[in-house]
Image: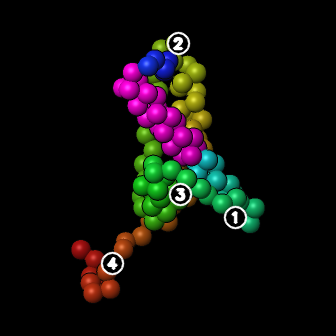
Amino acid sequence: LKETGSGRDKRMLADAGHINKSLYTLGKVIRGLERLARDPSTAPRVPYRDSALTKLLISSLGGSSKTLMVGCCASSDKAIPETLRTVDFAARVRGIKNLPRVHVAEHQNLVQ
């Protein structure tokens, strides 16, 4: 985005910066979880708390939830670079292992 002088453009530029930071942090979390799945003893700290997006997704990313990753790929020649990035991202996400379990409150001994 090109910055002009208006307040609206500055807000859009700031929002785009926040989105890019969140997506960058999501990539760091996925790389950390992938390393953790390969060798837990050498894996770095997974930076869940570095962005609001990854805080929201903490139970879905290597947590106790079932998670589905959907990647959209286009067949157009113009979309080949983006499609390759999507496939690479999906391959990295595939390495993450979740341990889904049912959470039951202590006062409820039955799972419905």
Q: Is residue 12 magenta?
A: yes
Q: Which residues are magenta?
A: 6-27
Q: Which mark is residue 77?
A: 2
Residue 81 coordinates in the image, percent (x, y): 58, 21
Vertical arrangement, residue 79 with respect to residue 64, above or below:
above
Q: Amino acid at mark 1?
A: Pro
Colouring style: rainbow
Disc 1 element: loop
Alpha carbons under labels 3 and 4: distance apart: 26 Å
Q: Residue at x 51, y 43 (%)?
A: 22
Q: Residue at x 45, y 65 (%)?
A: 64
Q: Amino acid at mark 2?
A: Asp
Vertical arrangement, residue 52 with respect to residue 39, above or below:
above
Q: In terms of sequence position, does the residue under pointer 4 or pointer 1 come before the other?
A: 1
The residue that label 1 is drawn on is 40
Residue 65 coordinates in the image, percent (x, y): 42, 61
Residue situated furthest right in the rendering? 42
Closer-to-camera residue (4/29): 4
Alpha carbons under labels 1 and 3: distance apart: 20 Å
Disc 3 element: helix
Q: In terms of sequence position, does the residue under pointer 1 or pointer 3 come before the other?
A: 1
Q: Residue at x 45, y 44 (%)?
A: 69
Q: In terms of sequence position, does the residue under pointer 4 or pointer 2 come before the other?
A: 2
Quadrant location of residue 103? bottom left
Task: Point out the image quarter for the C terminus.
Answer: bottom left
Tags 2 and 3 touching, CB below 8 Å? no
Q: In terms of sequence position, does the residue under pointer 2 or pointer 3 come before the other?
A: 3
The residue that label 4 is drawn on is 104
Q: Residue at x 57, y 41 (%)?
A: 24
Tags 4 and 1 touching, CB below 8 Å? no
Q: Amino acid at mark 4?
A: Val
Q: Which mark is residue 49?
A: 3
